[in-house]
Image (tube, grey):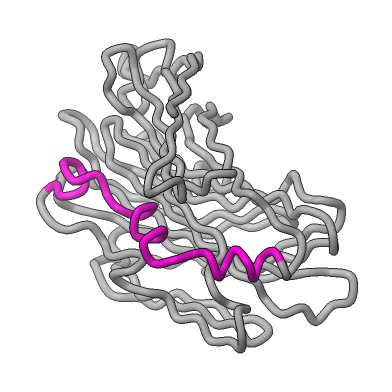
Amino acid sequence: MAVASALLFTGAADGDGGQQHHGVDIASLVKSEKAINKGKTKLVEFKDSHGERKFYAKVGPRDKVSLRKTSDGSLEIGVKPYDPVTDAEVDKMAAEMQADVLGERRRPLPERGAAGRAAPSWGLVRPPEAIAAGSAGLIYSAGCLYITSEMYVKGCYERRRVPESIAGWYLRMDTSEISGHHVGTYGGLTGMKSRHDYDAGYAGTEVIKNRPAATIEAGSCRSQSIGINYEGIEVSHAIQVCPERLSPYVRAKYFHHAWSGRVWRDGDWRDSLGHSVVKARDGHSNGFDYRISAFQDDAFQNDSWVNAG
C-alpha cells in the first residue's frame, strides 16, 4: 500500500541569478512510500508536480526517511534506521539480512546509473571483508539514498555489531560509500558528503574511531584501500580515488567524509568512503542518522564546505 504526502521546500539560489541547487525549482515535492521485495524493503520517493523523481531511498521497513534543507543551502536526503539497543536483537537482524535484501536495496536506477560507464562497485559485487567470530561483524542494517536531480548520487550505509570491551556500553561500526556524477546540461558536480550523525544519541554516545582520519589528496585516479579495525572486527574496501580531495570531519557525536573537486562529464564518477566506530550506553539508542548531499557549480569547492558539519 502506497502512502503520499506533500512536502514544502524552497531551493537556495546561487550567484547566477536564480539557478537552484539540484534543479529543484519548485516549492513542493510529494513523498510516497511502498513496500517492495515481499515487504523486506521500503521504497520512499520524492517527486515534483510533474511526477519526476528527484530523491528516493531503499531502506528497512521500520526506517524513517526525510528530506531537509541544510545551513549551507543544499537539500539532503536522510534516513534514521531502526536502532536496536541489545546484541540479541542485532544478531536476529543480522540473521535476517539475506543477500536478496542487500541486492534490492543497492540496485542502481538503470537509466541514470549507466551514464557512459558502469557505476563504482558496491555491496554484493564487492563484498566487504568482515573478520570476527559468530555474528559480530555481520551486516544487520543497510540502505541506500539517491539524488536524481541534475546529478546522479547514491549513498549507501552498512551497520555492524562490535564485541563490547567496556562495561555498561555497546559498540557499533558504521560504513558508508557515496558515488556520483553530474547529469545536468549546465554546471558540474563539485562536492558530495556522506554523514554519520549521532547527535540524537543518549548521553555519552561518542565516535571513538574513524577512517579516513586525514585528508586524502589525489592528482589522478588510483586505487586506495580505506579500512578500519576494532576489537577483532576488520572492514576494508578498495575504491577509485580521483581528483581532487577526500576529506573527513569528526566531532564527539558526528562523522562525515566528503569528496570535493569538479567533474562535468556524465560518464565520470567520483567516490568517497568512510567508517566510524561508536560507543553508546547499554539499553539506549546511539541516534544514528545517515544523510547524503551533493553540490554543483564552483561556489562549493572550498574547505569551509568540506569542514562544516
**x and y percentages locating residue 296 in the rendered image:** 32, 35
Q: Residue at image x 45%, y 81%? A: 129
Q: In this picture, is 29 found above or below 122?
A: above
**x and y percentages locating residue 46 in the rendered image:** 40, 26
Q: Main secondary structure of the magenta part?
A: helix
Which quarter of the rendered picture does the C terminus lie within?
Answer: top right
**x and y percentages locating residue 31 in the rendered image:** 45, 23
Q: How many marks?
A: 0
Which is more toward the observer, 99 or 289? 99
Left-right relation of 36 to 189: right
Left-right relation of 51 to 185: right
Q: In this picture, which residue range is highlighted in magenta?
A: 89-115
Which quarter of the rendered picture does the N terminus lie within?
Answer: top left
Q: Is residue 43 visible?
A: yes
State the image quarter where residue 123 is shown. Answer: bottom left
Residue 114 highlighted magenta (yes or no) = yes
Q: Residue at image x 53%, y 86%? A: 131
Q: In this picture, is 17 found above or below 279?
A: above
Which is more toward the observer, 19 or 269? 269
**x and y percentages locating residue 173 in the rendered image:** 62, 68
Q: In this picture, is 143 found above or below 273?
A: above
State the image quarter where residue 20 is shown. Answer: top left
Left-right relation of 269 to 249: left
Q: Residue at image x 46%, y 50%? A: 40
Which is more toward the observer, 42 or 142? 42
Which is more toward the observer, 264 or 280? 280
Residue 6 highlighted magenta (yes or no) = no
Q: Is residue 213 visible?
A: no
Q: Residue at image x 89%, y 70%? A: 168
